[in-house]
Structure formats: structure tokens, C-alpha cells
């Protein structure tokens, strides 16, 4: 009887040992997986990082003539202006007062390197950051009384840089180049995509 009891105890101990061994392995494996997740995630771009660089869509039908919207792309304000015929007309006639009238030294895609600095006369798309020290210019679309020859456009409240309705900088402004223009395109008549064009994503 004693031998039988010892044998039963050995079987119980062996079963318990197997259970504990399996439980320890399972716990260790689970711990390794949890430890690896943050490491693996650090190699893959986060949703936030992808969102910061992803192109942004804007519904142009929401914009009335003469109005401006300011969507955000890559943490930058984007000025989207629906210009009226009068606003378009006020872009010409003051090239002699501009620092870079032909946008030779300014940053814009090839398709926006024209007098209107845009793909179409109606819509202007700019990065809304002053090229002087990074302030955000304010829209001043009406002709300004303070500067009689200024046809209106954008005014930087930080240091007084003035830009016309194509984002071109006036002489006497601290900013040295015109407002920058991002890559963009129109997939259809009512949609603007900022941050990409026919060549791909910026």
C-alpha cells in the first residue's frame, strides 16, 4: 500500500510539474509578444504620422466667390481662395513693385509658375506661412488704404510683409520670396487634393 501511495504521489508531482512547465512557457511567450509589440510598432509609421503626410481633400463647392478656407496639411495652414474676376484683374499691373514678379526664386510646382500662380484663375492654393519668419498672414482682399498702391492680398501682422492676390511679395517687405505653393490637383470639378499631383504624393 505504501508503494502504491508513493507511486500516486509521484504521478501527481509529475503532472503538476508538467502543468507548471507549460504555464511558465506560455507566460514567457505571452510576455515576449507584449514586449515585442512596442518595438515592432516603432518600425511602422503611426496613424498620426501617416495622417500628417497624407494628401488632404477639400470640397470646393463650399467656397463662395471671394472667400478663403484654411484646411491643414502636414500641420501647415493651406490658403484656398476662390477669386472673383475683380480679384484676378487686380493681379496684373504692379510687377514693378514686386520682389519676384515671375516667381523665379520662389517655391511652387511648374504648373503654378505663371502670372496667376495657379492651375486656374478662379482658385489660388498657397501655404499660409509667411516666408520671412513663419507667421500666418491675414487675408486683406480689399484694397488697403494704408498702402494706396497695394491691390490687396495677404498681410503678415508680425513684420508687415505684403503679398498680392497671387501670393507675390511686394518690395519693402521683410519676406524675400513669394508665398510657397504646395503640390495639388483637381480629381474632379468640386474636389481639391493638396499634397499630391499627377507625379504622386509630396
Image (cartoon, rainbow, N blue to C red):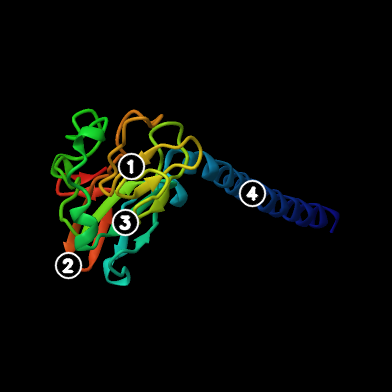
Which part of the image, by quadrant, shows the N terminus? Answer: bottom right
Q: Say whether disc 2 or disc 4 marks the residue closer to the N-terminus.
A: 4
In this orientation, which residue lies closer to the viewer: 125 or 143?
143
Task: Work out how far the residue at label 2 is from the one at label 4, CA to CA, in angstroms.
Answer: 58 Å
| Front: mark 3 or 1 | 1
C-alpha separation, residue under disc 3 versus residue under disc 2 = 15 Å
Frontmost residue, 58 versus 112: 112
- Number of numbered markers: 4
Figure check: 193 above or below 146: below
How far across and down, in percent of the image, does residue 171 sit?
32, 31
- Residue on which disc 1 sits: 163
In this view, the residue in front, 4 or 80, is: 80
Q: Which residue is mark 3?
A: 80
The residue carrying mark 4 is: 27
Dot placed on the residue nearer the N-terminal end, 3 or 2: 3
Q: Is residue 173 left or right of residue 88?
A: right
Residue on which disc 2 sits? 189
State how far apart marks 1 and 2 are (Cα): 28 Å
121 is higher (above) or lower (below) than 163: below
Amino acid at each position: 500500500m505504501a508503494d502504491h501511495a508513493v507511486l500516486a504521489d509521484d504521478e501527481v508531482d509529475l503532472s503538476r510539474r508538467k502543468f507548471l512547465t507549460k504555464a511558465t512557457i506560455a507566460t514567457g511567450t505571452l510576455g515576449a509578444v507584449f514586449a515585442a509589440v512596442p518595438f515592432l510598432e516603432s518600425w511602422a509609421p503611426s496613424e498620426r504620422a501617416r495622417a500628417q503626410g497624407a494628401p488632404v481633400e477639400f470640397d470646393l463647392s463650399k467656397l463662395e466667390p471671394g472667400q478663403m478656407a484654411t484646411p491643414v496639411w502636414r500641420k501647415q495652414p493651406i490658403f484656398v481662395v476662390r477669386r472673383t474676376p475683380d480679384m484676378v484683374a487686380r493681379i496684373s499691373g504692379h510687377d514693378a513693385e514686386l520682389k519676384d514678379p515671375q516667381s523665379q526664386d520662389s517655391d511652387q510646382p511648374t504648373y503654378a509658375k505663371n502670372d496667376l500662380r495657379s492651375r486656374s484663375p478662379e482658385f489660388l492654393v498657397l501655404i499660409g506661412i509667411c516666408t520671412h519668419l513663419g507667421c500666418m498672414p491675414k487675408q486683406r482682399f480689399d484694397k488697403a488704404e494704408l498702402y494706396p498702391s497695394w491691390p490687396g492680398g495677404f498681410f503678415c501682422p508680425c513684420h508687415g510683409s505684403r503679398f498680392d492676390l497671387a501670393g507675390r511679395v511686394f518690395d519693402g517687405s521683410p519676406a524675400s520670396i513669394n508665398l510657397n505653393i504646395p503640390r495639388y490637383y483637381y480629381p474632379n470639378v468640386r474636389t481639391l487634393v493638396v499634397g499630391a499631383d499627377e507625379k504622386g504624393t509630396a
